[in-house]
Image (cartoon, rainbow, N blue to C red):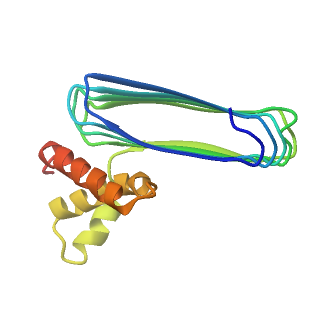
Amino acid sequence: MQGSRSVYELTEVSTGGKLSRHNVHVQQEGPDTITELSSFHLSIGDQLQDLHSKLVLDHPRGFSRQLHKVIVAHSLGQAVFDGNVQVNREAQQTDAGQLSRSLLLEPRATVNVKPNLQIIADDVKCSHGAAISDLEEDQLFYFQARGIDKSAARKALIFSFAAEVIEQFPDATLQKKVGNLITTLLTPALPSR
């Protein structure tokens, strides 16, 4: 429960474990409330990273942003995102956004995403989206055109994909520690295509 004019920020990074599930439920209980949820999940082996979230906006002028990013770097790896943002009738002048981006690094890697935006109010600005892909050839070409080999380009793009969430941590020391952990975990799992 989130009171009037409060700010709630959640930044999480999840990896490891055969099965990891996180349920997040946030309810805005007053007007002028800000909620920001950022998550990065990494599946580097035969692992399942699973996030279910629900955000309920019940009052005017609520603001919310949810960014969910996942990398599945193993052919038996899996990830799930089931994100629900509910904008109820009284939540006029709400600004809500939800984005899920998934990067699959192996041909049989699996991700199931279900972004869900339920809007009952009529004076709102809301958006949601989901993208699932491998790295884009245009991005790799940009690096290669500047003399960077394809393997180094892939690594840079993959690490920068995760950095968008890692940079949300308020402490630079924690950002560096988490970034180094992700680099250590991803390096042996990176395909050498």
User: Looking at the image, which is closer to me, 3 or 126?
Assistant: 3
User: Looking at the image, which is closer to me, 49 or 36?
Assistant: 36
- Left or right of 147, for residue 83: right
x, y (%) of residue 114? 54, 29
What residue is drawn where x is 28% and y is 63%? 140
What residue is drawn where x is 80% and y is 39%? 30
User: Looking at the image, which is closer to me, 28 or 72?
Assistant: 28
x, y (%) of residue 167? 41, 58
How many marks are shown on the rendered structure?
A: 0
The image quarter containing residue 12 is top left
* Name of the residue lying farthest toward the top: 19
Q: Is residue 10 above or below residue 157?
A: above
- Left or right of 175, for residue 186: left
The image quarter containing residue 89 is top right
Q: Is residue 154 visible?
A: yes
x, y (%) of residue 156? 26, 62
What residue is drawn where x is 22% and y is 31%? 75
Q: Is residue 136 visible?
A: no
Q: Is residue 31 above or below residue 89?
A: below
Q: Is residue 182 above or below residue 80?
A: below
What residue is drawn where x is 15% and y is 51%? 193
x, y (%) of residue 44? 22, 36
User: Looking at the image, which is closer to me, 177 or 136?
Assistant: 177
